[in-house]
């Protein structure tokens, strides 16, 4: 619209003229009115806290007063040398792996079962989605009852099978598997919903054409449906990884990081060794590491999935 | 060898009956065109033959075989969709030989058939492209290629040319006619387009509300439409359908006369005034108003100059009138 009224480049209008034009066509007004609130809020609640914790990370500070005891990189060194931190990082990696290799395929499988619009499917979708709607703490509590060796479902199983009672969440080897089971249960519905939305966008005649060609159900999934929903799978993988980096509030009611720190994640580690022990500087250092990890994931995601535009 | 027979087929979706009771024989190697107004069940009929829908009752036979309960892939058919249904992530070659790969056809055989289809459809230079990098006509050819490599006994087409522009449509129409001559299979073709129906078909099936109004060769339908519906549906511009009373034939409910069968003269006949004149170059289509008739469409030679408001005399060619009774059925030949 403005292009047609633009004079040729050699006599470009002066700045004042250009400013007036922008101002009078309403765009400047829109920018001036709409941008500041978002910018101010973003700065206040995102940029400033981030910057602050980046600063605290170099101090030994308990959260009261102003940080004064500058310690350089000592917080990071301590973290790197701490075996529990290594466990926490290892656990977070395990959660990522399970999310990508167990949770997403499960979600896709269920999505393929219920994506078509029928009343029964709608009911199943709702049921599958319930864990995701539930508050994390509530879900954690429910599962801690399930796993309770004295009164829970596992107790009934033990009694029925006539075996010795077992305490999953107190078992150093089993506890984290239990935690991962709960994580898969809690979040698969979210990924399933992403896939359902995407699958509903696959043109029906593509599937019918494949049927005519003699493709079996698995072949249709593999050659027609999955290629079609690849962008949705990429998005869901991104959320799975970012979510895995942040697992916290499910673990607290389940195991609180125990037994003997076997089920810590990066965030529970931050909470346990930074906040509850009033070592805000140290906690901030963990936070900085976590933030960098998240940014790396985002950058890789951009690189891998966004670069080659999907058809 | 591959005659298609529908025997008392019905199809309902829930409480909606789309096809009440339909029997149809499509002769082997024929080019049969299904036409009818939107929503009359043409696509549904095609999908019943393809096996994408199961009939609520009745049988479907292809060749000697009863395929009513068979999977689409086991019927020896192929189908070209209106949207082409090409897989966007696969190259043209992969789109064409997808079915052969799926069925584990040996490499050489697959290559041979792919090359053959590409040659017939002049797609050799595009085999490595993705569908998004093709023009509409090329996509259409890929969709047809996908059908050809399967060597089907019956080709099904659901409005395959409706997404193309007029020039391309004409070209593809000719290519389809050639294809039919060269590969000698039964073809069943759904279209909205009069010209496609008239030019491609050996046999036209006119459908209305899930029922067959008339089956016949294009000229049969044109010259002796069995009902008012067919009379009005086949031919462009439409046949004039006039009340019998208004044209002095009270024994007929409706009298039909094609625009080219109206005589225009200076001398005797009814008085008429030109309301609208469409000059097409080769023809001039005039919409006239008569004393008893609001709109009479007349096709005149292109050299006849006529303008709005001109007065003229018209009469109806007595040998070319179609007379229909109160039920809309064709009546016996016109009296002298
Ligand atoms: N899966 C379905 N469920 C319910 N109703 C359907 C279904 N498929 C078709 N119909 C109905 O059946 C009727 C016939 O549809 P069909 O697609 O066969 O018409 P058509 O003759 O091909 O029309 P068009 O020329 O517009 O393509 C329509 O009223 C349509 O709404
Ligand atoms: Mg249709």
Image (spheres, rainbow, N blue to C red):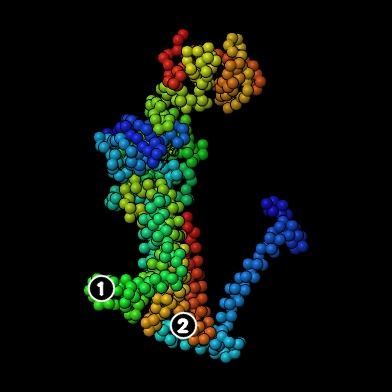
- In-front residue for pair B185/A11: B185
- In-front residue for pair A252/A172: A252
- In-front residue for pair B308/A15: B308
Q: Which badge, 1 or 2, is on the more N-terminal residue?
A: 1
| Residue at the image position 42 percent from the left and 76 percent from the top | A253
| Residue at the image position 47 percent from the left and 30 percent from the top | B194
Chain letter of disc 2?
A
- Residue B198 point in image, percent of width and height: 44, 28
Indicate left or right for A260 with A243 as reference: left
- Residue B292 point in image, percent of width and height: 58, 16
Q: Quadrant of residue A193?
A: bottom left
Few, some or many C-alpha atoms within 10 Å of disc 1 (few <14, some 14-19, many ≥20)?
A: few
Q: Is mark 1 within 8 Å of ligand 1?
A: no
Q: Is residue B277 visible?
A: yes
- Residue A110 point in image, percent of width and height: 37, 59
Few, some or many C-alpha atoms within 10 Å of disc 2 (few <14, some 14-19, many ≥20)?
A: some
Rendered position, A288 above or below A134: below
Rendered position, A107 above or below B85: below
Indicate left or right for B186 with B259 as reference: left
Q: Which residue is mark 2?
A: A272
- Residue A92 point in image, percent of width and height: 42, 75
Q: Which residue is mark 1?
A: A159
Mark 1, secondary structure of its residue: helix
Q: Is mark 2 within 8 Å of ligand 1?
A: no
Q: Furthest residue to the left?
A: A162
Mark 2, secondary structure of its residue: helix
- In-front residue for pair B136/B83: B83
Residue A79's disc is none
| Residue at the image position 43 percent from the left and 30 percent from the top | B208
Ligand 2 rendered quadrant: top left
Chain letter of disc 1?
A
């Amino acid at each position: 619209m403005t292009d047609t009224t633009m004079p040729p480049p050699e006599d470009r209008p002066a700045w004042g003229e250009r400013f007036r034009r922008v101002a009078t066509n309403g765009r400047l007004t829109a920018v001036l009115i709409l941008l500041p609130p978002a910018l101010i809020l973003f700065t206040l609640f995102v940029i400033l806290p981030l910057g602050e914790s980046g600063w605290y990370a170099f101090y030994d500070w308990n959260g009261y007063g102003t940080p004064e005891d500058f310690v350089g990189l000592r917080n990071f060194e301590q973290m790197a040398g701490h075996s529990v931190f290594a466990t926490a990082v290892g656990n977070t990696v395990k959660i990522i792996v399970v999310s990508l290799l167990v949770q997403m395929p499960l979600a896709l499988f269920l999505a393929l079962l219920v994506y078509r619009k029928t009343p029964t499917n709608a009911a199943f979708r709702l049921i599958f989605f319930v864990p995701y709607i539930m508050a994390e703490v509530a879900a954690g509590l429910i599962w801690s009852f399930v796993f309770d060796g004295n009164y829970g479902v596992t107790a009934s199983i033990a009694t029925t099978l006539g075996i010795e009672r077992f305490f999953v969440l107190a078992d150093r080897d089993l506890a984290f598997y239990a935690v991962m089971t709960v994580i898969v249960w809690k979040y698969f519905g979210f990924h399933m919903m992403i896939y359902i939305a995407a699958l509903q966008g696959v043109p029906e005649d593509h599937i019918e054409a494949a049927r005519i060609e003699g493709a079996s159900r698995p072949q249709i999934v593999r050659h027609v449906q999955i290629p079609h929903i690849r962008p949705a799978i990429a998005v869901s993988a991104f959320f799975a990884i970012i979510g895995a980096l942040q697992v916290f509030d499910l673990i607290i009611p389940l195991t609180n990081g125990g037994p003997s720190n076997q089920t810590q994640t990066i965030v529970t580690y931050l909470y346990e060794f930074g906040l509850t022990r009033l070592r805000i500087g140290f906690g901030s250092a963990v936070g900085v590491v976590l933030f960098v990890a998240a940014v790396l994931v985002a950058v890789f995601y951009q690189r891998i999935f966004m670069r080659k535009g999907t058809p | 060898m591959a005659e298609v027979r529908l025997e008392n087929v019905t199809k309902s979706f829930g409480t909606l009956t789309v096809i009440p009771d339909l029997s149809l024989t499509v002769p082997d190697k024929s080019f049969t065109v299904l036409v009818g107004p939107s929503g009359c069940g043409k696509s549904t009929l095609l999908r019943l033959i393809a096996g994408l829908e199961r009939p609520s009752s009745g049988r479907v036979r292809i060749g000697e075989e009863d395929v009513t309960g068979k999977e689409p892939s086991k019927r020896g058919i192929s189908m070209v969709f209106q949207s082409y249904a090409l897989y966007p992530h696969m190259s043209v070659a992969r789109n064409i030989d997808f079915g052969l790969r799926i069925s584990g056809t040996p490499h050489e055989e697959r290559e041979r058939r792919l090359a053959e289809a590409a040659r017939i459809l002049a797609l050799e230079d595009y085999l490595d492209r993705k569908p998004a990098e093709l023009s509409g006509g090329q996509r259409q050819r890929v969709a047809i290629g996908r059908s050809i490599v399967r060597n089907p006994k019956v080709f099904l087409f659901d409005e395959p040319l409706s997404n193309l522009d007029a020039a391309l449509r004409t070209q593809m129409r000719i290519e389809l006619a050639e294809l039919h001559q060269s590969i000698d299979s039964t073809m069943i073709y759904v279209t909205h387009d009069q010209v496609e129906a008239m030019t491609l078909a050996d046999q036209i099936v006119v459908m209305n509300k899930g029922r067959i109004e008339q089956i016949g060769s294009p000229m049969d339908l044109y010259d002796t439409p069995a009902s008012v519906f067919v009379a009005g549906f086949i031919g462009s511009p439409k046949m004039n359908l006039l009340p019998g009373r208004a044209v002095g034939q009270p024994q007929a409910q409706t009298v039909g006369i094609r625009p080219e069968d109206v005589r225009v003269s200076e001398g005797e006949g009814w008085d008429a005034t030109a309301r609208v004149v469409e000059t097409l170059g080769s023809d001039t289509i005039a919409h006239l108003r008569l004393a008893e008739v609001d709109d009479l469409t007349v096709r005149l030679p292109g050299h006849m100059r006529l303008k709005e408001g001109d007065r003229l005399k018209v009469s109806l060619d007595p040998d070319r009138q179609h007379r229909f009774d109160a039920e809309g059925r064709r009546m016996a030949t016109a009296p002298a």
